Image (tube, rainbow, N blue to C red):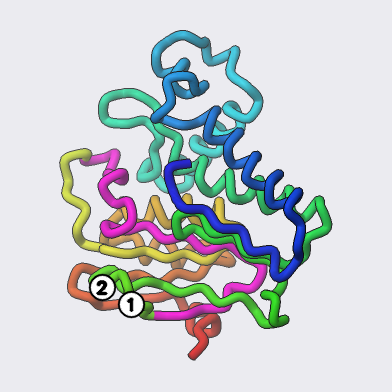
Amino acid sequence: MGMPITIDLAGRDDADLHRAAFDRFRQIDHRFSPYRDDSELAALNAGAIRAEDLSDEFREILELAEDAREFSDGYFDVRRPDGLLDPSGVVKGWAIKQVAQLLARAGSENFCIDAGGDIQVAGCNARGESWRVGIRNPFAEDEIVKAICPGTRGVATSGSYVRGHHIYDPHRPDRRLDDIVSVTVVAVDVLAADLLATAAFAMGRSGPEFLRAMPEVEAYVIDRDGIATFTPGFAALVVT
């Protein structure tokens, strides 16, 4: 999917399950990749397929994208400034969630999926401890500013050092997104976390307020001056 992906089954030795998980990622990439000429997305953007003929999975992605556009007041939008669709901002978190569900159906209660820094964890690691997730310093990517234990939840980060050049303000496409440099969200699953982090990053200075209003969501936001703000419950997730 154009990004590093790791799957840790917490000590479970199951090559077939690993293979099935990565096969699922490949299937999703084949359908939704904006870089493949033979993807369903490419066919739609080229006018070679009608909206009513889209696959059920593609329809699901578009429904999720529309829901995200509505709850974010239009700050999350999969339509690019040139009018073409690029649902990558939905697909990444959705793909991780799909693989997490595949692992759960196979009986895995303990795992960590990391796709390009967006993470879904469940249960414990191989040592029987809670999974720990590091939040990178956006000004020095080899440094961790916080380590958290998210529990069985998802963690996603949007930022100028991650993929900020893919995010824009749909209300003002020419606005430079430099007020906020990093938005990390912890939510019920990685799909929700990714959608919220992307929308909040596009909002800029109003992003933290938007996240504080979201139920069952914690967030850690770093602005261009290196000042961090976070939701009231975030401190409970931090480990030393």
Residue 188 visible to an observer of this rendering: no
**Residue 22 visible in rendering:** yes
**Residue pointed to by mark 1:** 143
Which residue does the image show at 48% across and 47% down from the upper left?
71
Separation of residues labelled 2 and 1 (CA atoms): 6 Å
Q: Local crowd at mark 1 within 10 Å, few (<14), some, or many (≥20)?
A: few
Camera-side residue of 136 and 195 = 136
Residue 101 appears left or right of 33: right
Query: Which amino acid is tagged 1?
Result: Glu
Q: Do the residues under discs 2 and 1 have CB atoms within 8 angstroms?
A: yes
| Residue behind mark 2 | 140
Q: Position of residue 35 (x, y in %)?
A: 39, 30
Q: Would residue 14 be found to the left or right of residue 100 on screen? A: right
* Residue 185 colored in magenta in the image: no
Res. 74 mark: none
| Residue at x 64%, y 40% (from the top left corner) | 23
Please tell me whether mark 2 sits on a helix, a strand or a loop.
strand
Q: Residues within 10 Å of mark 2 (few under 14, many from 20)?
A: few
Q: Residue at x 45, y 55 (%)?
A: 116
Please report the residue visible at 17 percent of the width from the left and 50 percent of the height from the top.
176
Which stretch appears magenta? 146-172
Asked if 77 appears above or below 198 in the picture, the reply is: above
Residue 149 lies in magenta, yes or no? Answer: yes
